[in-house]
Amino acid sequence: MTRNKNHLLAYFGHHKAASTWINSIIVDVCNNLGWKTSYVSNANMFNHNLKEFATLENVDFLCYTNADFLYVSALENFKGFHVIRDPRDLITSAYFSHLYSHPITKHWPELKEHRRQLKELPKDEGIILEMKFSKRFLEEMYNWNYNMPNILEIKMEYLASNPYKNFLNIFDFLGVLNKNAGFKYYLFQLSNIIINKLNKKYKKYYFIPFQFSMDSIPAERLLGIVFKNEFSILAKGRKIGDENAKSHYRKGVFGDWKNHFKQEHIEFFKDNYNEVLLKLGYESDPKWWGNLDRH
């Protein structure tokens, strides 16, 4: 079952910018409404043709992490949102993730060798290596077109500071927020519960759900989905700020780079990525490092 759509919905994210959390919320929404979602993180996954992939797969909601605007620019008739993160926090998060928790998959075999190298280096040298390894992720944020009227731009830090309000705003922007939850949605949910129970009981699959598509998510249901995906739940009871370096949900705070960057890291970062930081609006002073409180 797919929604009655006149345009594609899309989320565009970047590596270590809360993409797993955001994708989980989107998948829950789509599962609730019977929409088809597809997750891609590498151009090889869509054969370097995002437009053709979305069409052939009949996607309702596309989740594209490690988003490269080169491929996004070929899309037509879509509405989406784009999430970025402070590049310094991205590097810090990537260092711990690549050292311990990020899965090594066939779509990213380079990570295996990178992890081996990180394990052999002291932390300070490892962070420098991470800055080199993660260059393409910072470049993808830098090369993005931030003036697309059909894409809502949002910083991860702002999104996570008030996820309930911001996800309501996101789905409202996408045009799929139902502010007046109606009988149709609950009938849809009830029918699927009953049919699933009957199928399980009789071990047959003759029962077909009511054939109508949902075009929007009730605001109350969306808030429940966001609650279900809170940090403390995903981190198995840890609160924001309680660190587990080996967990995918390591710490959940912003500005953590200040706890890990030493002068050598600041020097390397400003020499290589200062323009990224300034373009993304995380600093306005080109010599931001002179204002740091290192205590």
Image: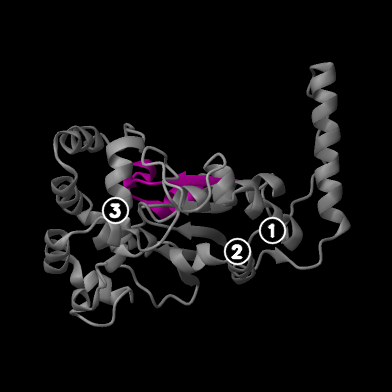
> Would you call the spot at circle 1 few (<14 residues within 10 Å), some (14-19), or many (20 or more)?
some
Residue assigned mark 3 = 92
- Tell me whether circle 1 and circle 2 mark residues in contact (CB < 8 Å): yes
- For marks 3 and 2, give the CA distance: 26 Å
Q: Position of residue 110 (x, y in %)?
A: 22, 37
- For marks 1 and 2, give the CA distance: 8 Å
Residue lying farthest to the front in this orientation? 295
Residue assigned mark 1 = 223
Q: Amino acid at mark 3?
A: Thr
Q: Nearer the viewer, residue 61 or 1?
A: 61
Relative side of 254 to 8, left or right: left
Residue assigned mark 2 = 167
Q: Position of residue 211 (x, y in %)?
A: 79, 44
**Helix, strand or loop for disc 3:** helix
Residue 183 drawn in magenta: no
Q: Amino acid at mark 2?
A: Phe
Residue drawn at x 34%, y 65% is 86
